[in-house]
Amino acid sequence: MAETASGSQDKSVQVKLVLLGEAAVGKSSVVLRFVSNEFQPNKEPTIGAAFLTQKCRLEDRILRYEIWDTAGQERFHSLAPMYYRNAQAAVVVYDVTKATSLEKAKSWVKELQRQANPNIVIALAGNKVDLVQSSSSSSGASSSPDSEDEADDATATPGETPGSPGEPESLRQVPREEAQAYAQEAGLLFFETSAKTGEGIVEVFTEIAKKIPIEHILAASRNNSGRPGAGGRGNNAREENVNLQDDQAKTKDACNC
């Protein structure tokens, strides 16, 4: 499915996408769920950035996402422009159980709107909704220190709330309505996701794909055959296929690749 009928090279579109957000909001887990439908609860923090790819079919187009998963630690902030330069899309991730992560996400959005490609498609994703849903079991969630070096995918809330574990909604610090209102005001796509269960993950990349100005990208690539983005791929690069149309018609957690 990576190639369409012979002579239809124009139907393949390369899209550079960058993930940004505070450390430990789950950026790497979001990408891993999308690329290989996996979840690793104790993943190591990203150092610098990781590079992954995923080919997706949307209607009659093949989109080849080139995904730069950036480190959230402040010491890597200065490297970010190298990864979002010339990006056609960005996913800015925050943790619904940590209010400060939304503030950090807002600062990333401002930076992108000020310095990135003026036509960039930006999605705001509130991750870890599994922690605030009553159907979710809170057993086994390990407490994590609120530290820069915290695992980027930690599913536990930084510093477990001493309240009753029977009330997961009490862990939520970012109301959906507040984040959604901000996203609408800033002109962003908005999602709430769970990399752990797969909820909302495919929708993020599907809706971004619908907003990408494909014809503009194709025209630009004809005029400039050079590849956008930094060289040197991370050592956890992957490439698989997912049919966005089919996945959208399935249940929310059916993120099949």
Image (cartoon, grey):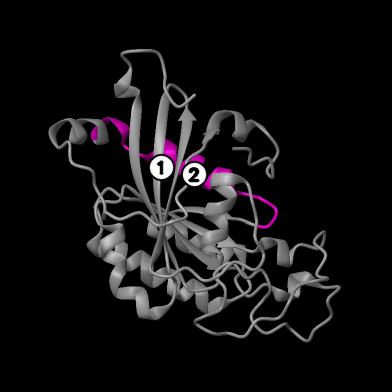
Query: Viewer-proximal residue, 114 or 86?
Result: 86
Res. 205 mark = 2
Q: Give the CA distance from mark 2 to mark 1.
A: 9 Å
| Residue at 13%, 33% in the rendered image | 223
Of label 2 and label 1, which has the lower sequence position? 1
Dividing the picture into quadrants, the one containing residue 72 is bottom left
| Secondary structure type for disc 1 | strand
- 17 lies above or below 155: above
First to last magenta residue range: 196-216
* Spot occupied by residue 178 in the image (x, y as percentages of width and height): 55, 67
Residue 188: x %, y % from top left: 42, 54
- Are discs 2 and 1 less than 8 Å apart at CB? yes
In which quadrant is the C terminus drawn? Answer: top right
Mark 1 is surrounded, within 10 Å at the Cα level, by few (under 14), some (14 to 19) or many (20 or more) other residues, namely many
Please state which amino acid type lies under the numbered disc 1: Tyr
145 magenta-colored: no
Above or below — where is 132 with respect to 90?
Answer: below
User: Which of these two is toward me, 173 or 136?
Assistant: 136
- Number of numbered discs visible in the structure rendering: 2
- Left or right side of 185 for 161: right
Magenta span dominant secondary structure: helix
In the image, residue 144 above or below residue 188: below
Q: State the residue position of label 1.
A: 65
Q: Residues within 10 Å of mark 2 (few under 14, many from 20)?
A: many
For badge 2, the amino acid type reads: Phe
Residue at 49 percent across and 44 percent down: it is 205
In the rendered image, residue 210 lying in the magenta stretch gets the answer: yes
